[in-house]
């Protein structure tokens, strides 16, 4: 049994932030009914025609984000779709969307309206800037969130703003949506009713500034962009060994002393370096000395030596190396997911490991409308004649 078994989610999301949120919920056992327009939601088209990154017309995006979900086509713009939507809401726990502000309301998804149908319903909207404030109607994608959240000015070396390699604007929004939804589920046990979860992708990026925002608010000075270095700790950087890059992450004074012994760097063992503040002032000299030493030997030799001394270090792994890392594989973080055509795809697994209600099972991402008749018959009791009529009139 999975942790979220028994929760039913109506998923009206598209692209990345919303589908990622519902994928997380699906992996933990929630029943995800993906309500799609007749032509399918936009994620289905991404990479669908790329011969290297698709299977039978289904691209890498949807292969991942569609797993453990069922697809129901419903044209919410059709005047006869509203009764079907309302009937599904009456039998659901959660409705989630990531439309632009105002679109969900026009489609009949406003929380106040749905709460009249089902007082226990939880709604969630992921938008670029949230549903309040002067910028709420501004268009947004991942990079807009990264840019307006401040993090791009902290990334790179300061020559020009640089976005994160991962789409943290979208993924961060999806993560916080999943957390917010689960918080609302817990609150429902106490207050006896559902509520609305308003997720702003910009809010999430500002939250992720964490202590760096606090540093600025205390001093009025923006922390510098230091590449792979750190605002506070030294040495904390990436370095080239003889055959590849690796990182050191020295945070404590004790780790510093062990590093000097393990790397045989007596020249750096001077009183001013024995405390974090002194090392920070000597960052350039320390980094240069460590770089000159590490380049002399292969990365594997250094990692063995440093790990034996309990020094935080790691290889900078390529995607190929990360996805074949024995630790990653031991944690079941690369899994086989079936495709509707019968083949298997390898994907990142579920990172949430629960001791009693964790089960790694994955169903194929659905074909468009694959479960329309089944869901409407099972949940709403519609007979074959009614379903055929709805199909003929373009409602489903």
Image (cartoon, rainbow, N blue to C red):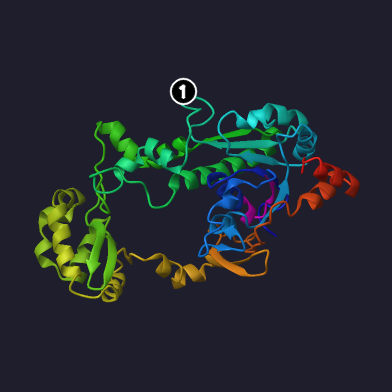
Rendering quarter of residue 299: bottom left
Rendering quarter of residue 322: bottom left
- Asked whether residue 31 is drawn in magenta, I would say yes
Q: Residue 43, image x and y in percent?
A: 57, 49
Q: Residues within 10 Å of mark 1 (few under 14, many from 20)?
A: few
**396 left or right, relative to 51:** right
Q: Residue 86, image x and y in percent?
A: 77, 35
The residue indicated by pointer 1 is: 134
Q: Does dot 1 land on a helix, a strand or a loop?
A: loop
**317 left or right, relative to 120:** left
Q: What number of labels is visible?
A: 1
Q: Residue 142, image x and y in percent?
A: 45, 43
Rendering quarter of residue 179: top right
Considering depth in this image, is 376 or 260 the residue closer to the camera?
376
Residue sitting at 66 percent across and 61 percent down?
364
Q: Residue 7, image x and y in percent?
A: 70, 47
- Asked whether residue 270 is drawn in magenta, I would say no
Is 331 drawn above or below residue 150 in the view shown? below
Q: Can residue 110 be seen at all in this image of the molecule?
A: no
Q: Residue furthest top?
A: 134
Q: Can residue 102 be seen at all in this image of the molecule?
A: yes
Quarter of the image for the C terminus: give it.
top right
Residue range of the region highlighted in magenta in the rendering: 24-35
Residue sitting at 61 percent across and 37 percent down?
124
Considering depth in this image, is 66 or 367 the residue closer to the camera?
367
Is 45 drawn above or below residue 87 in the view shown? below
Considering depth in this image, is 257 or 299 the residue closer to the camera?
299
Is 306 drawn above or below residue 75 in the view shown? below
Residue sitting at 68 percent across and 43 percent down?
37
Quarter of the image for the N terminus: give it.
bottom right
**93 left or right, relative to 294:** right
């Amino acid at each position: 049994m999975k942790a979220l078994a028994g929760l039913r989610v109506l998923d009206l999301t598209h692209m990345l932030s919303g589908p990622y949120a519902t994928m997380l919920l699906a992996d933990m056992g929630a029943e995800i009914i993906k309500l799609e327009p007749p032509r399918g939601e936009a994620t289905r088209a991404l990479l669908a025609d790329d011969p290297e990154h698709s299977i039978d017309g289904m691209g890498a995006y949807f292969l991942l984000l569609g797993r453990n979900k069922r697809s129901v086509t419903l044209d919410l713009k059709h005047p006869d779709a509203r009764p079907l939507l309302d009937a599904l809401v009456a039998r659901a726990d959660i409705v989630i969307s990531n439309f632009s502000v105002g679109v969900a309301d026009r489609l009949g998804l406003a929380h106040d309206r749905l709460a009249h149908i089902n007082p226990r319903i939880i709604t969630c909207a992921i938008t670029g800037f949230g549903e309040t404030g002067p910028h709420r109607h501004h268009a947004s994608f991942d990079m807009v969130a990264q840019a307006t959240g401040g993090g791009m000015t902290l990334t790179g070396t300061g020559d020009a703003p640089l976005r994160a390699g991962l789409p943290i604007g979208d993924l961060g929004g999806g993560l916080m949506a999943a957390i917010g939804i689960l918080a609302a589920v817990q609150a429902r046990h106490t207050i006896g009713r559902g509520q609305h979860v308003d997720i702003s992708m910009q809010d999430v990026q500002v939250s992720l500034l964490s202590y760096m925002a606090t540093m600025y608010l205390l001093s009025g000075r923006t922390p510098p962009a230091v590449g792979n270095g750190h605002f506070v700790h030294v040495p904390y950087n990436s370095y080239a060994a003889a055959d590849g890059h690796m990182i050191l992450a020295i945070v404590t004074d004790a780790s510093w002393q062990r590093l000097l012994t393990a790397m045989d760097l007596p020249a750096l063992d001077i009183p001013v370096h024995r405390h974090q503040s002194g090392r920070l002032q000597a960052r350039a000299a320390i980094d240069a000395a460590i770089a000159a030493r590490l380049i002399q030997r292969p990365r594997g030799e250094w990692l063995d030596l440093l790990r034996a001394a309990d020094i935080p270090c790691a290889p900078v792994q390529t995607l190929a190396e990360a996805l074949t890392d024995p630790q990653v594989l031991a944690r079941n973080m690369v899994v086989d997911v079936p495709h509707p055509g019968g083949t298997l795809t390898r994907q990142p697994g579920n990172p949430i490991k629960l001791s009693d209600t964790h089960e790694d099972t994955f169903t194929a991402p659905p074909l468009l409308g694959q479960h329309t008749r089944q869901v409407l018959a099972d949940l709403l009791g519609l007979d074959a004649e009614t379903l055929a009529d709805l199909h003929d009139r373009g409602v489903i």
